[in-house]
Each structure stands twice: as structure tokens, then as C-alpha cells.
Image (tube, rainbow, N blue to C red):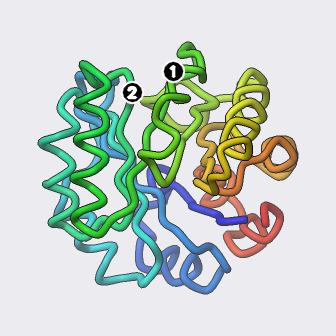
Amino acid sequence: MIISPSVLSLDYSRMAEQMSELNASGAEWIHFDVMDGHFVPNLTFGPDLLKAFRKMSSLVLDVHLMVTDPGFFSDVFLKAGADVITFHYEAMGSPDEIRSLAKHIREQGALAGISVKPGTDVSVLYPFLEDFDLFLIMSVEPGFGGQSFMMSAVDKIAALREKLNEAGLHAHIEVDGGINAETGRLVKDAGADVLVAGSYVFKNNIKEAVNSLV
């Protein structure tokens, strides 16, 4: 199980201290939410902050684009050091555009991911099983941290994992939103292998919280 703590919930008045704790925690990835104030009603981080995290950590930089123009922002954050770029199905215009952007991300040496909001049926991802390294199931509405977990995500994860297994594929299934020790077990049992947790990690003892999710 890969744990990807979301720095959306990091205490930026204690950034150096919490990053030191995170680096020693057993987490393998850092989840970095990019919001443009248009695709979702919030603004977050730019590429310079991602560069700062790269200087502070050797963990995998897992960038989640919640933006209207994923093509533009993919290149911005690839240049800033992203190891994983995930964009939203709902932000794209056609299957060809989705596959083209996934191919471009992979060609730059990063893992390509695609995400769906809670209200989007998971079946829209089935035509793209071979095109992506990671599928991100949102278990809250994207845009803000600290929301409660939506149980509908569990069935989505199970259905998607079944389709990947049938195809002989081993892509990651990542879950983001309301993850704690209890919901983490639910999604792990359903087939997820990457857990994003923000408030649960950074508002508690970081190492203990990460260990409870593994």
C-alpha cells in the first residue's frame, strides 16, 4: 500500500518540521493538489512550491490537476518536477484528447493518471484501461480538504479493479477524500493500492497516522 499524504492539509507555519516528519514516516508519495479556481472553486499551489517540495524531499511527487486546461498545466508541473500527473476526465473534450495527453505525460517520463468526480460513473474509465498508470477515484467532491468520505467510492474501486484484473493490467487505483484508518481499510479491501490522506496525517502524529494506513 502506497500512502500519499496531501500537502493541502500541511501546516505551512511548520513546513520544515512537518516535512522532516513526513520524510521519516514511511509514506512513499506526496500528493500535491493543483486547483485553478475555475474547474473547482478554490485556488491552491503553483509550480514554484512543487520545486520547493522537490528540494525538501525525495518522495514521489504525485500531482493532481483539478484544472480546466490540463494540457497546459501538465507541462508546467512536469517541468517543475512532477513524477505523477493526474488530470480529470471531466475536464477533457474527447477520448482522443484524453489518450493524447496520457501519451504525452508518459513520454516525459512521468506516470499518467486520470480521475473522476463522485458523480461520474466509473464505467467512463473502462475504454482507457491501457492508457494510464493510475486511476484516481474521488471519494469527496474535489476542491476542498477535510470532507467526509463517500461510500459510493468503494463500489467504484471494486468494479474498476475487476476490469483491470480481467484485462491483466496492474495500474494503481488511488483514492482521495476522507481517508482515515477505517475508510482506508474499506478501499484497500475493494482494490485500492494508493491512499491519499490530508487532515488525518497532518493534524495527528504523522508517522502514526501513516503507519495506520499501510
Disc 2 residue type?
Tyr
Tag shown at residue 124: 1
| Residue 105 x/y as whole percent | 26, 55
Relative vertical location of residue 207 with respect to residue 136 in this rendering, above or below: below
SS label for mark 1: helix
Q: Quadrant of residue 43?
A: top left
Q: Nearer the viewer, residue 83 or 182?
A: 83
Q: Which numbered disc flags the more N-terminal residue, 2 or 1?
A: 2
Q: Nearer the viewer, residue 6 or 77?
A: 77
Residue 108 left/right relative to 120: left
Q: Are marks 2 and 1 in contact (CB under 8 Å)?
A: yes
Disc 1 residue type?
Val
The residue shown at (46%, 35%) is 128
| Badge 1 density bin: few <14, some 14–19, many ≥20, Cα 10 Å | few
Relative vertical location of residue 123 with respect to residue 10 in this rendering, above or below: above
Residue 76 left/right relative to 67: left
